[in-house]
Amino acid sequence: MPPLEKQIAALEAKIVKERAKLADAKAKAAMQIRKRDTRRKILFGYAFLDWTSNLPRLERNRIVGLVHAQLKVKEREAFPLREVLRDIEARANKQVNPESTTDPVAPCLPFLDNE
């Protein structure tokens, strides 16, 4: 194979390799975006549920009912409104430890070790 053809073959191989690297980088970026979006939804959902637990019962039921109605049918079936309200009610009735040292602006999340 003449030297020029070898150079062309080497450059084509390099292009294929670089395209694969580009595809991997795009896939990694998309995965990070999905992870961040999932984390955002979890945190906002937790904050919403925590906030509603501090509302008066009728207002809490109304607001949670409105949000629940916006869920897809499959999601509403997986998380029935009655169960969601029962869980929020249980949280609202739970005594909060007054000696807690958590920051009131960033409340203790159940999946973080804040101690």
Image (cartoon, helix red, strand yellow):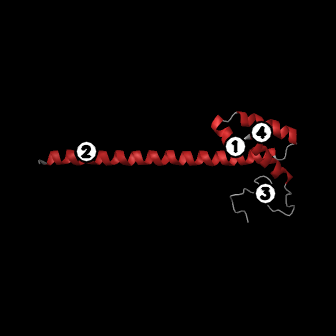
Amino acid carrying mark 2 in the image: Glu
Residue assigned mark 3: 103
> Residue drawn at (75%, 45%), measured in percent from left and top?
83
Q: How many marks?
A: 4
Decide: few, some or many residues near mark 3? Use Cα within 10 Å; few <14, some 14-19, many ≥20.
few
Residue 72 in view: no
Tag 1: amino acid: Phe
Amino acid, disc 4: Val
Which of the two discs, 1 and 4, sits closer to the camera? 1
Q: Nearer the viewer, residue 4 or 107?
A: 107
Question: How far separated are the C-alphas under marks 1 and 3?
Answer: 30 Å
| Disc 3 and disc 4 in contact, CB within 8 angstroms | no
* Position of residue 53 measured from the top left corner of the image (x, y, whole percent): 82, 47
The first of marks 1 and 3 along the sequence is 1
Q: Position of residue 24 (x, y in %)?
A: 41, 48
Residue nearest the viewer, comparing 26 with 2: 26
Q: Amino acid at mark 3?
A: Asp
CA gap, disc 4 to disc 2?
58 Å
First in sequence: mark 4 vs mark 2: 2
Residue 61: x, y in percent?
Answer: 82, 39
Sequence-first disc among 3 and 4: 4
Kindly report which numbered mark, 3 or 4, lies closer to the viewer in this rendering.
4
Q: Residue furthest bottom?
A: 115
Q: Which residue is mark 4?
A: 64
Q: Nearer the viewer, residue 55 or 5?
A: 55
Residue under label 2: 12
Question: Where does label 1 land, which residue?
Answer: 79
